[in-house]
Image: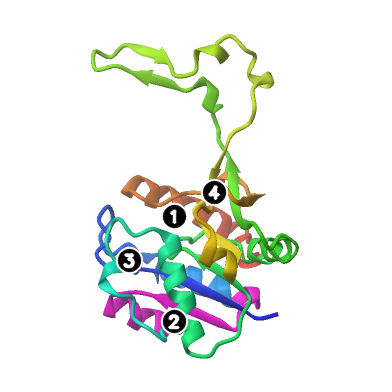
Amino acid sequence: MSNICIIPARGNSKRIKNKNIRLFNNKPMISFAIEAAFKSNLFDHIIVSTDNNEIAKIAEEFNAELPFIRPDYLSDDHTNTQAVIKHGIYQCENLGWDFNFVCCIYPCVPLINSSDLKTSFDIATISKNSFIFPIAEISSNPQRSLGIKQNGEIFSLFPDYEKMRTQDLKKGFFDAGQFYWGHKELWKNSKSIHNNAKGLIIPKWRAIDIDSEDDWIMAELMYNIQDKRGEIGKF
């Protein structure tokens, strides 16, 4: 069974400048995604989809493939992941490549675990009509969420649950933002990832979405703590 990995990494990131290739623990950020893909031994091709020459150069240094350049119309702030992966699938099919499953790995995932890629792929092979991706439990129950008015007044967003015991509330989970497995036909035809999926629960400390400098600092702290414990090398 043939699989490909597509890592979507556009240039000109807005919230953190050059996020995809900025050094994290002395390595370009995108290298962690590429290395995890190689370590999993699941892929016939590991591809970076980018519109940026500098990203392309660094990706090639880590042995990723760049068989096509992502067009400008798929490189703006409004393009969603599915559109980019679908484009990559069609480009690879035009090259005559034969494959079944496609894994999108985001480029900023220094805490990714290659064993999660393997476990998720096992689920994907028996759940061809579902995407598979890692999720983590929300620390505070979402049904106890609070809102704040312009005058500073606090109110309950879900007042029906305000007096319920915490242990009686349903657990909430969030998308870890690391990767998505799916059969290539599912990528082509599905309108939604989150509403057509199964989740793999991972520890919360490995589910840091790096969108700000605070997130970056937290991710580096967690990476270095686990590295000292010898955990990073096991991934």
**In the displayed structure, does residue 38 sit left or right of residue 152?**
right
Classify residue 10 by image quadrant.
bottom left
Q: Residue at x 39, y 58 (%)?
A: 80
Q: Who comes first in sequence, dot 3 or dot 1?
A: 3
Please name the residue that numbered disc 1 is placed on. 220
Query: Which residue lies most toward the right here?
Result: 126
Q: Who comes first in sequence, dot 1 or dot 2?
A: 2
Q: Secondary structure at mark 3?
A: loop
Q: Nearer the viewer, residue 51 or 227?
A: 51
Cα distance in 3D space between marks 2 and 3: 28 Å
* Magenta-colored stretch includes residue 41: yes
* Magenta-colored stretch includes residue 84: no
Classify residue 156 by image quadrant.
top left
Q: Secondary structure at mark 2?
A: helix
Cα distance in 3D space between marks 4 and 3: 29 Å
Q: Who comes first in sequence, dot 4 or dot 2?
A: 2
Classify 41 as above or below 110.
below
Q: Who comes first in sequence, dot 4 or dot 3?
A: 3
Which amino acid lies under the numbered mark 4 shown in the image of this protein? His
Q: Residue at x 45, y 62 (%)?
A: 82
Pinpoint residue 17: horizontal percent, then vertical percent.
25, 60
